[in-house]
Amino acid sequence: MILVEAPGLFTTVQDLGRMGCGSIGVSPSGAADAVALRVGNRLVGNPEGAAALEMTLAGGTFAFPEGALAALAGSDFGAILDGGAIPAWTPFRIPPGGRLRTGHTRSGARCYLCVRGGIEVKLFLGSASTHVLSGLGGFEGRSLKKGDILSIGKSEMAEPGRQGAVSDILLPRKPLRVTDAPQSDWFSEAAQSIFYNSGYRVTEEANRMGLRLEGPVIPAPAGGHMITEGVALGAVQIPAAGQPIILFVEQQTTGGYPKIANVISADMSSVGQLRPRDQIRFERVDQTTARALLREQEEAIRAIH
């Protein structure tokens, strides 16, 4: 088990999300940085989609009465295990009675605590992910509180062997690479030039539903409105005010703002590591390049074994 002695700023149970539920209005949720979750799980010998703890900006303190095999993946939260520093991206043993402390982020927004066997919670629509807005899934549908006790599952997989090095390909990057979106051709050349040649700042209104950006105004076609339609993860909407919004893992499943671009799958984990006040830019790529980058990322993940 894991005893939560201090929950941190915002810590939730997350796996790879619940896919295929958009038609009933339920977004995928899941890890904001799915690459970090998958690698962390591989490091401890779990299936890639096993549930873990996602810590945001500031981590917590967790006691392990019976010990565990664990790994921290994602941002560096300055973890300390019983007085000794623990690096990210490396599996480590927690002795019975061990206490893991994580602090404020030193890089990026989110850190994942993966334990062998995964976090065991009741599934909602086939997923352990916490859907914060609806209060469903995860541990009682909410972020963790002091005194919570989490169960660790049993693992039937073989103990992990020698680990491959974590490639730079799997680390967050800027600028964010995007492809054209359904309404890209609605935007004038001047509007697209502003979007691709300007820097944008992540505002304080950045969460798991979406990231509001602040920067040069992009003239929105049709007054920033259109007939509502289904929207994709990573869609970049331009509302009437002309400030971009990146839709994220707890996005609404439909929207009525025109979309100028869509973040490619290989860069969604980078979106998950953006903090308020971070500066970003966008780089346009075609579909062929986007698929090649995703294949390259998948190969780098499979190299961790």
Image (spheres, rainbow, N blue to C red):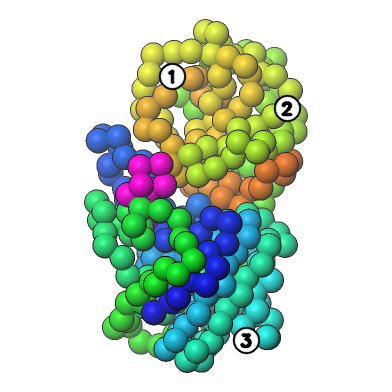
Which one is earlier in the sequence, the residue at label 1 or at label 2?
2
Which image quarter holds the N terminus? bottom left
Which one is earlier in the sequence, the residue at label 3 or at label 1?
3
Which residues make up the magenta segment? 129-136
Q: Describe the element under mark 3 as helix, strand or loop.
A: loop
Vertical order, 245 against 9 (above or below): above
Disc assigned to residue 215: 2
Q: How many marks?
A: 3
At a point 39% along the width and 65% down the height, the residue shown is 51
Residue 82, by quadrant, is bottom right
Residue 277, by quadrant, is top right
Which one is earlier in the sequence, the residue at label 2 or at label 3?
3
Residue type at mark 1: give it: Gly
Disc assigned to residue 82: 3
At a point 55% along the width and 19% down the height, the residue shown is 239
Vertical order, 55 against 289 (above or below): below
